[in-house]
Amino acid sequence: MKINWSKYTPFQQKVYKAILKIPKGQVWTYKQVAIKIGKPRAARAVGHALARNQDAPFIPCHRVVGSTGKMVGYSASGGIRRKLEILKKEGYKIVIKSR
DNA sequence: CACATGACCTAAC
DNA sequence: TGTTAGGCCATGT
């Protein structure tokens, strides 16, 4: 599977590559990813990059969660619901605090 | 170039 | 513990 990085901005490429480095069963926070790309304060930009990503099924964006380990959004099919299912399948136990 | 929006984060009430 | 306010960064119009 190859991705047309041409339709993505350099920043998006950086973010996606960083996410692709996330080990299976492990989840990172937007801030962690932002730090990984060299911009600890660009957590928002990271979220934006993921929101604009068109290769959701290939990009493990479901491994990116909020600072509290809670998922905040998911543009792919199913939304948060799908994200939870994928994470559960990956072996990551999700702790639902607010039911 | 300036304004407005968004899958965020932190602090304070 | 839950909600509100402010700040930061990149993208699109």
Image: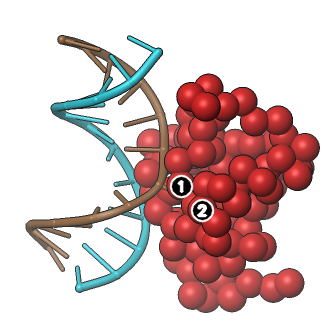
Chain colours: A red, B brown, C cyan
Can you tell which of label 2 and label 1 is closer to the viewer? 2
Q: Which residue is mark 1?
A: A73
User: Tag 1: residue type?
Assistant: Gly
Mark 2 or mark 1: whose residue is earlier in sequence: 1
In the image: residue A7, left or right of residue A23: left
The answer to whether the residues at label 2 and label 1 have Cβ atoms under 8 Å apart is yes
Q: Which residue is mark 2?
A: A79
- Chain where mark 1 sits: A
Percent of width and height locating residue B5: 27, 65
Q: Nearer the viewer, residue A90 or C11?
A: A90
Q: Is residue A14 visible?
A: no
Q: Nearer the viewer, residue A72 or A38?
A: A72
When the figure is inspected, residue A75 is found, relative to residue A68, above or below; the finding is below
Percent of width and height locating residue A20: 78, 61
In the image: residue A87, left or right of residue C12: right
Which residue does the image show at 66% across and 31% down from the upper left?
Answer: A96
- Chain where mark 2 sits: A
